């Protein structure tokens, strides 16, 4: 894909230079995060509820609730702004966070916990991961 | 005179007790560390940007921490009070990084 997919403009907004296919990839990732946050049966649900303090049986409910709220808020804001050409800073940060949550969930669910596992995963999954990594790489350059 | 001795004695006892209490307090208030763990998919630039945004560290410090995570598998990115450590950990998890808290050994 030639050129940058996201560009920080002088007025502070982030310009989204994605075609329909690119927005489709993002839409799917955002939708999975929203669904996983709401549905305890969703494959990604556990990865969104990783332990905060592994030495305790249960995490502080307030911290867990804060995480749940923030992930859901970011994902919903991302979906609401999916078709925008320009994002403000908070919206762009919500996109980055939600895409990164989706990327890690995808890796955890597929057991990709090492470089070797990543290299040996199915081609289709690898391409999906590389696409999201490229999107994240370009979006991170705006911050 | 006797009463003065008593006063001195109790003063010394008080100091010793105070010192002991201080030592106990130091032992129980070990800092809590926020740990970020390596994973094979997160782009390095994302890790740097998240550290910068959440902690406000300099570019150099964020890059150094990111490289520590990458090479050593984990890095302590913040230390201090438990409540703040958990709050930072949640922020890192919300940003999609693998983070936990643990008390300093």
Image (cartoon, rainbow, N blue to C red):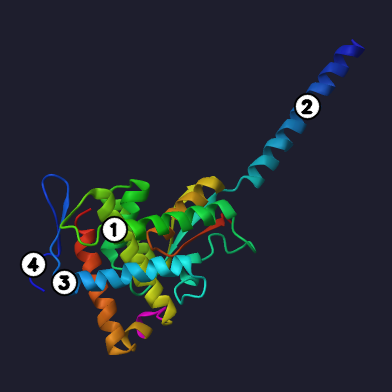
Q: CA distance from mark 2 to mark 1?
A: 64 Å
- Mark 2 belongs to chain: B
Label 3 sits on a secondary structure element that is: helix
Tell us which disc is closer to us: 1 or 4.
1
- Quadrant in the rendering for residue A128: bottom left
Query: Residue at point 47% right, 70% down?
Result: A47
Q: Earlier in the sequence, mark 3 or mark 1?
A: 3
Q: Which residues are magenta?
A: A112-116
Q: Which mark, by number, is residue A129?
A: none
- Marks 3 and 1 on same chain: yes
Tell us which disc is closer to us: 2 or 3.
3
Q: Does the magenta portion include A29?
A: no
Quadrant where the C terminus of chain B sits is: bottom right
Q: CA distance from mark 1 to mark 4?
A: 25 Å
The kind of secondary structure the magenta stretch mainly shows is loop
Nearer the observer, A88 or B54: A88
Taking A132 as reference, is A78 above or below it? above
- Mark 3 belongs to chain: A
* Left or right position of A72 against B85: left
Nearer the observer, A93 or B84: A93
Tag 2: Cα neighbours inside 10 Å, few (<14), some, or many (≥20)? Answer: few
Q: Assess whether mark 1 and mark 2 are in contact (beta carbons under 8 angstroms).
A: no
- Mark 4 belongs to chain: A
Label 1 sits on a secondary structure element that is: helix
* Residue that protrudes farthest toward the top in the picture: B1
Label 2 sits on a secondary structure element that is: helix
Residue occupied by mark 4:
A3
* Left or right position of A57 against A104: right
* Residue that protrudes farthest toward the left in the picture: A2
Residue occupied by mark 1:
A80
Q: Does the magenta portion include A114?
A: yes
Q: Which mark, by number, is residue B14?
A: 2
């Amino acid at each position: 894909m030639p050129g940058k997919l996201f560009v920080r403009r002088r007025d502070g907004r982030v310009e989204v230079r994605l075609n329909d296919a690119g927005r489709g990839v993002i839409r799917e990732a955002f939708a999975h995060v929203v669904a996983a946050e709401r549905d305890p049966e969703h494959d990604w649900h556990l990865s969104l509820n990783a332990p905060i303090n592994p030495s305790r049986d249960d995490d502080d409910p307030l911290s867990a609730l804060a995480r749940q709220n923030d992930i859901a808020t970011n994902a919903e804001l991302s979906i609401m702004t999916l078709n925008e050409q320009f994002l403000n800073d908070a919206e762009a940060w919500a996109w980055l966070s939600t895409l990164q949550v989706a990327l890690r969930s995808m890796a955890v669910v597929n057991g990709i916990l090492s470089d070797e596992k990543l290299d040996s995963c199915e081609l289709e999954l690898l391409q999906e991961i590389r696409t999201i990594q490229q999107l994240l790489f370009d979006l991170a350059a705006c911050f | 005179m006797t009463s003065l001795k008593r006063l001195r004695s109790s003063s010394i006892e008080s100091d010793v007790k105070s010192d002991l209490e201080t030592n106990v307090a130091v032992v129980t208030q070990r800092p809590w560390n926020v740990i970020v763990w390596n994973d094979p998919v997160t782009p390095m630039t994302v890790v740097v940007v998240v550290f910068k945004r959440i902690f406000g560290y300099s570019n150099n410090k964020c890059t150094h921490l990111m490289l520590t995570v990458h090479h050593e598998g984990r890095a302590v990115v913040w230390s201090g009070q438990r409540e703040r450590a958990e709050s930072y950990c949640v922020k890192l998890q919300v940003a999609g990084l693998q983070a936990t808290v643990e008390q300093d050994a």
